Amino acid sequence: MHTTDVDRSDPAYRAWLSEAVRKVQADANRSADTHLLRFPLPEEWGIGLYLKDESTHPTGSLKHRLARSLFLHGLCNGWIRPEAPVVEASSGSTAVSEAYFASLIGVPFVAVMPSTTSREKCRLIEFHGGRCHFVDDPRKMYAEAAALAERSGGHYMDQFTYAERATDWRGNNNIAESVFSQLRSERHPVPAWIVATAGTGGTSATIARYVRYMQYDTRICVADPEYSCFFDGWRDHDPTATGERGSRIEGIGRPRMEPSFMPGVIDRMMKVPDAASIAAVRALDEAIGRKAGGSTGTGLWSALKIVAEMAGNGTKGSVVTLICDPGERYLDTYYSDAWLAEQGLDIGPYAGAITTFLATGHWPD
């Protein structure tokens, strides 16, 4: 009797893998949970508006959680190997976080990004040892990243495909479990709405599935920026929807319906003008003294609209949205009046609407 036997056991690789996984998991153990901040609203409204401040992660954004999950996913699947580069298509923040984890485990990292990505994000990627590779058309990022990984013998991380499956949406200290734990002692511990924004779609997918799994009566709203196809694809039930250009709000909005975006778990979507996003993020700075990126403003604008609806019909409860990354990365864009003028953006009417609402409780038409 003959048995064909091929043994590809590699003790050296398994030792490297074990150490790499240990380092990534140790990062989570060293990191305290992020804060849940309150946006000041009149007490008599009976509504709490909270912001999960993901900017306090070691790499400064919501994407730190995703990057950790993606690295564990890639390592345990045997895709990330010693000395082979990790390549990612990103508009910036995910690449910063992935550069950090690549450095942590000692592999090269290349970020394929739009040429319009903020200089500060590029600096942070390089600070963590990564390399920036630019494309003029954001729609070409995916193919270029895949080709670059193929040429270099590396691994294309592909956050836009794997974001929703790399994270354990049932719990295990994901962002949804953290939010509900932190709300436990509040007046309204189960939020009426959680508002997320979508880049990969992984965060909204994680939160929405966790809510269903735990049987909470919480609705999920996704706020989408101007130049993104997510809203149109969701509204029209069209998985082939595409856009003509990249999003002006870095980190969110896509020119195609990404595999990680899960329309079926989303209750509501809002299409938010870019000027409204920027007005909201500046209002946040005035209200709590925290600068945040434009994606935070997109979510906050939608959250304020929902709060206005609740106040208008006398509904008590809580609403949660996210601080996705720090505003210091965008001082020369979203916080620059010269940049606004160059882009033809007038935030005045939107800033006035927020001011009027917070002063009167009525959202102007």
Image (cartoon, grey):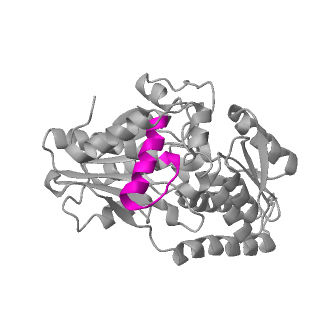
Q: Between 120 and 254, which is closer to the camera in this rendering?
A: 120
Please say whether residue 141 is visible from this viewpoint.
Answer: yes
Residue in view at x 59 percent, y 76 percent: 26
Which residues fall within the magenta stretch? 275-295
Q: Main secondary structure of the magenta part?
A: helix
Q: Quadrant of the C terminus?
A: top left
Q: Between 261 and 273, which is closer to the camera in this rendering?
A: 273
Q: Is residue 161 above or below residue 41?
A: above
Q: Is residue 278 above or below residue 319?
A: above
Percent x, y of residue 19: 69, 75
Q: Between 252 and 178, which is closer to the camera in this rendering?
A: 252
Please say whether residue 177 is visible from this viewpoint.
Answer: no
Q: Picture quarter containing residue 264? A: top left
Q: Between 76 and 211, which is closer to the camera in this rendering?
A: 211
Residue 294 part of the magenta segment? yes
Residue in view at x 47 percent, y 57 percent: 168
Q: Is residue 299 above or below residue 96?
A: above
Q: Quadrant of the N terminus?
A: bottom right
Residue placed farthest to the right in the image? 151
Percent x, y of residue 349: 39, 33
